[in-house]
Image (spheres, rainbow, N blue to C red):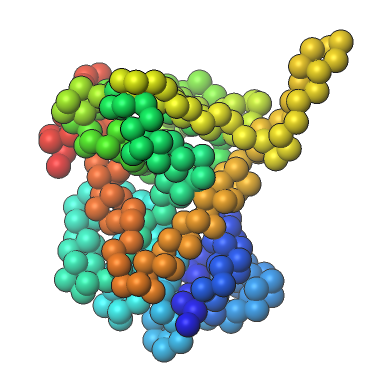
């Protein structure tokens, strides 16, 4: 039996998930909804699903689960609505930009017993997952330091920045989740620095385009995160983990992995241009994990709780920048 899925939101990330669903033999995309009819029709035409309204999907008897890829300010309401009609839910991060609203939403999910999975796709990247597997196998001993480099090739549209929640809630939130995933311990303190170096207009939105964060756990493990909205050389995604017995790293990846050596030196093709291609395997594995969890009636992961903790860390980073100090996570949660 295949899991029948409806896609809410036919934008950039919705298209990525539609492709992942189409490649999964255990799932089928039956419906898509979007406020822009042309976007919904494009996915409908490509994957053979119906265009429906969100209200129609809520009432549909042929939909087992939904993927929420709509704007952030709609996520919590949609999670609650679909929880109450008994449909499994996959939601892109974050649940909401307000911690109290997130708690209210997760209370509904707990009350209804709904399966909820958060869209932290990087956990499912084959290379990053292999790092976690090597840690679990004891290959590098006890984790002591993690270094995460995550830099976008350029600024997103300013219309997006205006509603994104800022660099920490929108971009670094993925790295906060990855830090927890690799450290294996909860974060106790957050120290962040942030600047506007790419475009002065970013400051008009009370946002930053360049950030560095230091996280520490109760036992003293450290994670350093480096973010920028401008990497002229491509989508820069690297991780290094130092342990008591050694080190493991995941380097950048390219659409074509070759190296040319001649009188001009050593050259390689450019990096991936953004997340849609760099993490295509991660998105497929993420959807496969969601489908498997729902079909097996097991708790999906990353969970709503993981989404909540990542947002807490984002808020701690904002407070650290505002007050130029180390922030204890317990201050916020």
Give coordinates of residue 323: x percent, y percent: 22, 22
Give coordinates of residue 121: x percent, y percent: 46, 50
| Closer to the camera in the image, 38 or 302 | 302
What residue sits 31% from the left and 20% below the top? 244
Give coordinates of residue 160: x percent, y percent: 50, 46
Left or right of residue 43, residue 190 in this image: left
Judged from this view, the residue extending furthest toward the right is 263
Location of residue 205 (image quadrant)? top left
| Closer to the camera in the image, 159 or 66 | 66
Residue 73 in sight in this render: no
Left or right of residue 98, residue 14 in this image: right
Counting the numbered discs, the total is 0
Residue 188 sits above or below residue 102 on the image: above
Residue 227 sits above or below residue 157 on the image: above
Location of residue 119 (image quadrant)? bottom left
What residue sits 73% from the left and 37% below the top? 256
What residue sits 23% from the left and 67% below the top? 109
Residue 264 sits above or below residue 153 on the image: above
Residue 52 sits above or below residue 114 on the image: below
| Closer to the camera in the image, 247 or 310 | 247
């Amino acid at each position: 039996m295949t899991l029948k899925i409806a896609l809410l939101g036919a934008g950039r990330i919705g298209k990525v998930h539609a492709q992942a669903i189409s490649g999964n033999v255990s799932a089928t995309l039956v419906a898509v909804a979007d406020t822009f009819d042309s976007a919904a029709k494009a996915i409908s035409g490509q994957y053979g699903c119906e265009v429906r309204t969100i209200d129609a999907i809520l009432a549909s008897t042929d939909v087992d689960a939904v993927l929420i890829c709509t704007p952030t300010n709609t996520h919590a309401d949609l999670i609650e609505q679909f929880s109450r009609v008994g449909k499994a839910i996959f939601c892109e991060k974050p649940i909401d930009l307000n911690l109290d609203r997130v708690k209210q939403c997760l209370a509904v999910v707990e009350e209804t017993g709904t399966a909820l999975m958060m869209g932290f796709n990087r956990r499912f990247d084959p290379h990053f997952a292999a790092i976690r597997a090597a840690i679990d196998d004891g290959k590098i001993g006890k984790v002591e330091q993690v270094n995460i480099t995550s830099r976008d090739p350029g600024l997103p549209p300013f219309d997006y920045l205006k509603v994104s929640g800022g660099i920490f809630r929108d971009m670094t939130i993925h790295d906060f989740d990855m830090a927890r995933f690799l450290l294996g311990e909860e974060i106790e303190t957050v120290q962040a620095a942030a600047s506007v170096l790419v475009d002065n207009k970013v400051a008009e939105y009370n946002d930053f385009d360049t950030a560095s964060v230091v996280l520490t756990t109760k036992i003293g493990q450290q994670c350093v995160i480096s973010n920028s909205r401008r990497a002229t050389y491509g989508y820069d995604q690297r991780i290094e983990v130092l342990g008591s017995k050694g080190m493991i790293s995941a380097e950048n990846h390219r659409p074509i992995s070759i190296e040319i050596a001649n009188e001009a030196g050593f050259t390689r093709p450019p990096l991936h241009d953004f997340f849609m291609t760099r993490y295509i395997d991660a998105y497929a594995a993420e959807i496969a994990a969601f489908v498997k969890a729902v079909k097996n009636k097991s708790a999906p992961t990353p969970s709503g709780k993981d989404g909540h903790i990542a947002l807490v860390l984002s808020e701690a980073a904002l407070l650290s920048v505002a007050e130029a100090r180390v922030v204890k996570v317990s201050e916020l949660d």
